[in-house]
Structures are given as C-alpha cells and as structure tokens.
Image (spheres, rainbow, N blue to C red):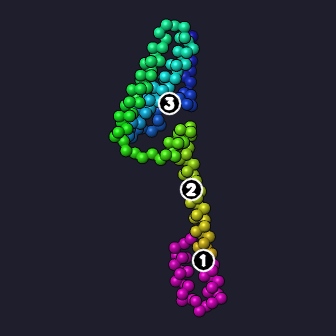
Amino acid sequence: MAPQPRQPPAPDSPRSSQSPAPSGVQGDLELELLGLANALYNLGTTVINDSTKERDKPGGGKQVGLRVNNVITHLATIDDMAQHVHTMIPMQVLADIDNARNPMQLTKDRLERAATENQFMNGKISAIDSYHRYLDEALLQNFPELDGQLAPLADKQISEGP
C-alpha cells in the first residue's frame, strides 16, 4: 500500500503559531494555552473515535479519561500561571471570543475604521485650511486696510501647509 500524501490540517485544528512565543511569563502562558488547545483537540478526536469504533469493546473509555485528565492538568497549570500575569484584556475582546468572533479580525476592523476616520478628519482639516486661505484672500481684496492684520496669519498657514 502506497503512503498517502499528508493532508494539511483542518482550518479549525490547533497548530503552532507563525511567530515565536514571547519570553517570560506571558510566553510560558502562551505555550500552555497552545498545549491546552492541543489537549482539547485530542480529547475531541478521542471521544469521536471511542463513540464510533470502540463502543463494543470493554474498557473503551480509558483513553477518554486520560485525555480529560490531561485537559484538567493544563487548566490547573493555566490557573496557577494566571496569578502572575497582570495583563488587562478589554471585555469587548472576551465577549467577541465568547461569541465565536476572531479577535484578530476585530482588531483589523477597528484599525481600518480608525484609518478611515483619520483620513476623513484630515480631509475636513484640509478643507477648513483651504477655506481659511480663500477667506483671507477675499478679505484682503475687499478690505485692503486689513493687510497688516491678516497677512501674518496667511503667511504662517502657507508656510505650514494644509
């Protein structure tokens, strides 16, 4: 029998991060969370295998018990490590995770929204500066006696740019 080509992992299966874990307590916590994700994945596959293939065999639940104990060990370790981590996480991020939304997508959406609003605000500022220059020019044309009061302001804005 010829070996089958290796299939890529399922999109929802845990896999290693593209970037290395940070050093220190947060890095250890990240690695422990990755271990928990793998333990949960293994528990899920074991439960499916045990319920479909080993249903009729005596003692078929042993593997599930070992996998559950592994998950509990990871959870206990994470709980112990949490006492040393004082990072604040916004409640909105936790709520989105609970609602099965990807926090990276949320971050991307917020950054894009901030960039759009920034561009919009820069456009408003540019429009106001342009209007101010046109107003000064019109005032100087119609009221030449204001030349001493408006000229320094107009020169300052032209040198600073929009």
How far, Cα to Cα, is label 2 from label 1?
26 Å
Magenta-span inclusion, residue 54: no
Residue 28, quarter of picture: top left
Q: Are marks 3 and 1 in contact (CB under 8 Å)?
A: no
Q: Residue 40, position in %: x, y? A: 48, 26
Q: Which label was assigned to residue 115?
A: 2
Residue hosting label 1: 132
- In which quarter of the view is residue 69 placed? top left
Question: Reading the chain from its start, which is encountered first: label 3 or label 2?
Answer: 3
What residue would you read off at disc 3?
14
- Please give the name of the residue rendered at 54% of the width and 42% of the height, measured from the top-left corner: 96
Q: Is residue 75 visible?
A: yes
**Vertical arrangement, residue 65 with respect to residue 88, above or below:** above
Q: Which residues are magenta?
A: 134-162
Q: Position of residue 83 (x, y in %)?
A: 35, 39
Work out how far the residue at label 3 is from the one at label 2, CA to CA, in angstroms: 32 Å
Q: Give the residue type at disc 3.
A: Pro
Reply above or below: 141 against 160.
Answer: below
In the image, taking residue 101 as reference, residue 87 lies left or right, namely left
* Of residues 105 and 22, the one drawn nearer to the viewer in this rendering: 105
Residues 150 and 70: in front is 70
Secondary element at image label 1: helix
Who comes first in sequence, dot 3 or dot 1?
A: 3
Q: Which residue is found at the position 56% from the left and 24% from the top?
A: 7
